[in-house]
Structure formats: structure tokens, C-alpha cells
Amino acid sequence: MSDTAYTPPKVWVWDQANGGEFASINRPVAGATREKDLPVGEHPFQLHSMATPNGVKVTVLFEELLEAGFTDAEYDAWLISISDGDQFGSGFVDVNPNSKIPALIDNTGDAPVHVFESASILFHLAEKFGAFLPKDGPARTEVMNWVFWQMGSAPYLGGGFGHFYAYAPEKFEYPIDRFTMETKRQLDVLDRELAKKPYIAGDDYTIADMAIWPWYGQLVLGRLYSAAEFLDVASYENVVRWAKEIDERPAVKRGRMVNRSFGDADMQMPERHSSADFDRVGK
């Protein structure tokens, strides 16, 4: 099972040359590494993010709010290039001391409100606009259940399976087997639930779907880690049905573009400052 034997040292010491796709930005300490102010646009909501699954959650919600007629949800979206280490700029760290995207500044009140962690941003916006989140009772609890399920589960998919299968400098059987098993278990959880209802929290499309879809929906659609065949995602028929239906929503199509600086040119919108920006994508 093991390709090499490893004995952990008594005290771990950081090896900066440990390899891997993100080795140049990973480090065991927090805080800013450079002085860099954040840009400021004209809208009350200032989003600083990148179109990773966690970033897509928030841009999809913003676009869904606008699609639903909440004109006060207009926002500026600024690119934080995590491969370039923008998340360690002093301005970003002031908003999110954890140096992870996405981060939001809400200037709608008397003083700016800093919101970080994608689930916190989803709840903040859904509560502010009274949309995509039941106000109270069991229905609200069910949405919260699934949002927090996603927050607890996705690290096994991304930092676990995705890292060892796609990004690690060397591939080893044990971690890939371990995290593949857990990823497939999570897909089975979703598949069994979605066999009983159209959306993950019930009959209505909510922030629970917006939290889960960028990870698990895009996984079964073949957009994450080039792992769809390896994971046999077609066998999760209910997840695939749900993923395809959400993928067709106009707001989701727009949300996927925002803060994207990679992939197909017709999907890239590094910054977003108005709905008119979508007309210029790929031109």
C-alpha cells in the first residue's frame, strides 16, 4: 500500500521546497506579506475573489439576486489572484485575516462590514435581501444543515481528493484511495437526498444549492480535477440531473464568469462592475 516509509520528526519544520502546484504560496504563518490596498468601485458591495468553487458561490448569489429584481444587489467584483499571492496583500488581510477568498465589504450601513468565509457571505446577503433562505422554522434549519454540510465536506473533496489526485507533486495510493472513498461517499449522500426532492433542501432553490453546486455540481459536470471518469460520476444520476438543471440558470452562467482569469476566453471576466460587462466577455 505504501510506496515509501515516513517517520514524522519530533518537531515539524517547514520545508519551503516541498513541491506541489501551490507550494510557492503555501506557508505555516498568517498575516500580510506585502503592502497593497484594495481597489474601490462605485457600488456598496465590494467583492474580492476568484472563480474557484468558493468564489463562484458568492457571484452566483449576487447574480441570482439581480436576476430576481433586487437592484440594490449591484456589486463590484475584483480579482484576487491566489496563484500570485494577492490574498496576502495588507488590504485583503484587513478584510479577511485568514487570507482566503472570497471576502466582501458591505458599505450599505453607517460603517463598512467585513464578511469572510463563503457561507457567512451567503447568509449575510440572503438575510439582507430576504431571498433564497427561509425566514424561520424547519425549512430554514434544513438550508443551514446543508450549507454547513458543504463547508465541512468540501475540504475532503478539494484539499483531500483534489490535492492528492491532481496537484500533489507525486501520486501515492493511500491518500488517493482515502479521499476518493470519502468523495464518493459524499456524492452518494447527495444522490440519495436528491432522489427525494428537486433541490437539496426541498422544493425551493436556496443558498444551500448555491453552496454545494460549485463543488459537487461542477465535479459531476467534469469541470473539477479532470476526475469525472475516475469517480464514475455518471452513476450518481440524481446529482447529475440537479447539476445540469442549475447549470442552465442564466444567473449561474453569469456567476461562473465573474473573477475568472483562466480557461476559455469566452468565460473570463476578471473584474465585474456592471451587467454590461457580460456583453464584452470574449471580445
Image (cartoon, rainbow, N blue to C red):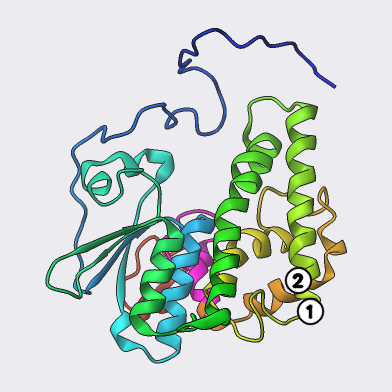
Q: What is the quadrant of the N terminus in the image?
A: top right
Q: Which mark is residue 268?
A: none
Residue pictured at 52% horizontal, 78% vertical? 140
Q: Amino acid at mark 2?
A: Glu
Q: Give me the C-alpha separation between circle 1 and circle 2.
A: 6 Å
What's the magenta region?
252-268
In depth, the one of 187 and 86 nearer the eye is 187
Q: Identify the residue at the far front of this view.
A: 137
Q: Quadrant of the C terminus?
A: bottom left
- Helix, strand or loop at label 2? It is helix
The quarter of the displayed image where residue 6 is located: top right
* Disc 1 target residue: 196
Residue linked to disc 2: 193
Q: Quadrant of residue 129?
A: bottom left
Residue 242 placement (x, y as % from top left): 72, 75
Q: Amino acid at mark 1?
A: Lys
- Residue 267 falls inside the magenta stretch: yes
Tell me if label 1 and label 2 are in contact, CB under 8 Å: yes
Does residue 195 sit above or below 85 in this rendering? below
Question: What percent of the width, then of the height, locates residue 111?
Answer: 13, 67
Write the residue at 39% across / 92% down: 69
Residue at x 75% of width, y 74% of height = 194
Residue at 19% over, 62% down: 40
Q: Is residue 147 above or below residue 7?
A: below
The picture places residue 3, in percent across and down from the top left corner, at 79, 16
Q: In the current view of this chain or complex, which residue is farthest to the left?
A: 110
